Each structure stands twice: as C-alpha cells, then as structure tokens.
Amino acid sequence: MSHPGTIPDQLELWLARLKRVCVLIGSIALVVLVATFGWLVFGRYVLNQTPTWVEQLALLLICYITFIGAAIGIHEESHLGVTLVRDALPAKLRQILLLLTDLVLAIFGGVMLVAGLELFNFGWSTLLPMLNVPESVRTAAAVACGGLMVIFAGSRFVLRGLCALRGEIYINKAKVN
C-alpha cells in the first residue's frame, strides 16, 4: 500500500499496538473471570460459604470482554457478515461499499460513545450491588467500545479513501498478519 515509515504505515502500526492492548485487557478480564468462578466453586463446596460478589464481578467482566472484543472485531474485520452481494460487485463498487461500511461503523461508534458517556455520567451516583463501585464502571466498557470503533473504523475509512484516491485497493494488514 505505501512505503515503510509513511503516515498510513505509522497509523496502522499504532492501531495494531492499540489492538494488542485491547487483547491484553480482554485476556486479563477473562483470566480474572475464570479465577473468580473457581473461587465461587471452592467457596460453595469446600468452605460451604458462597461468595456473593462473584456474580456482579462476572457481569462486569463480561461487559468488558464483550465490548472490547467487539472493537477488536471491527479492527480485524472479523465480524460475521453476509458478503455474497459485496463480493459479486465490480472492484470499484466494492470499494465504495467498503468505504460506506467503514463510515457507518465509525458513525455508530460515535453514537455509542456519546450515549455511553451520558449513561456514564448518569450512573456515577449509583453503586453496583455487592461490589460497591459506581455503575459507571460497567458503562465505561461501552464508552471504550464506542471510542475504539470510531478510531478503528474511522482510520480504516481514511486509509481506504486515500488508497481509492490513488487508484489502489486497501488491504487491511491486521487481517494479513
């Protein structure tokens, strides 16, 4: 697509690093989720005392795993989709459709970010039961997902558009690596 060290390559490198951070956060959340359920089973059957906070923590962690995973899927273009019509189109129309898809995803991420911020502000005074942390801690996952969608889909829209202006086809290096 471009020469090493150019702005598009630097952007793709930065996005790949951001994706790795998201994968790390999601992986840590998954390990903590498994460990807390291990503690739940141990507490229930060995100590004969069920920890009550595990369910709320599990719900919180699942929010982060799901929303961060969704943002990673946007970056890697790995979400389930019906591509029959898109793949049957000529290259120019396919490129336009891909640009439109990236734009719609970025707009949806922006709406999710704004709505999530409203929920974040609204839930700050409400505490999650058993955890005694603000409800906004849970909503922060949706805010992060919206922001990451704007970054991932918006940057791909820009990169794909730059390639289209040069008469090239954009290849997402995240899918190649």
Image (cartoon, rainbow, N blue to C red):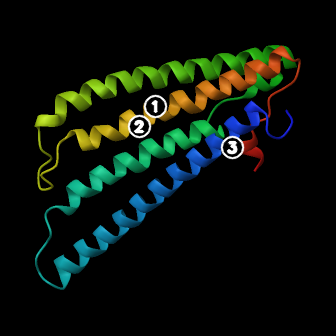
Crowd band around label 1 with a 10 angstrom C-alpha radius: few (<14), some (14–19), many (20+): many
Residue at 75%, 14% in the rendered image = 96
Residue that carries the numbered disc 2 in the rendered image: 144
- Residue type for callout 2: Ala
Q: Identify the secondary structure beneath mark 2.
A: helix
C-alpha gap between disc 3 and disc 1: 18 Å
Q: In the displayed structure, would residue 32 be above or below residue 136? A: below
The residue lying toward the viewer, choosing from 127 and 81, is 127
C-alpha gap between disc 2 and disc 3: 20 Å
Query: Mark 2 against mark 3, which lies toward the viewer?
Result: 3
Query: Mark 3 against mark 1, which lies toward the viewer?
Result: 3
Residue that carries the numbered disc 1 in the rendered image: 147
Q: Position of residue 75 (x, y in %)?
A: 61, 38
- Residue type for callout 3: Leu
Q: On the image, which quarter does residue 12 sit in?
A: top right
Residue at 44%, 36% in the rendered image = 145
- Residue type for callout 1: Gly
Q: Point out the residue furthest to the front here.
A: 5
Q: On the image, which quarter does residue 138 sit in?
A: top left
Residue that carries the numbered disc 3 in the rendered image: 13
Crowd band around label 2 with a 10 angstrom C-alpha radius: few (<14), some (14–19), many (20+): many
Q: Point out the residue furthest to the bottom here.
A: 46
Q: In the displayed structure, would residue 92 be above or below residue 36? A: above
Confirm or deny contact between disc 2 and disc 1 (CB under 8 A). yes
Residue at 25%, 32% in the rendered image = 120
Q: Identify the secondary structure beneath mark 1.
A: helix
Mark 2 / mark 3, whichever is N-terminal: 3
The answer to whether residue 78 shows anywhere in this view is no
Q: Position of residue 25 (x, y in %)?
A: 45, 55
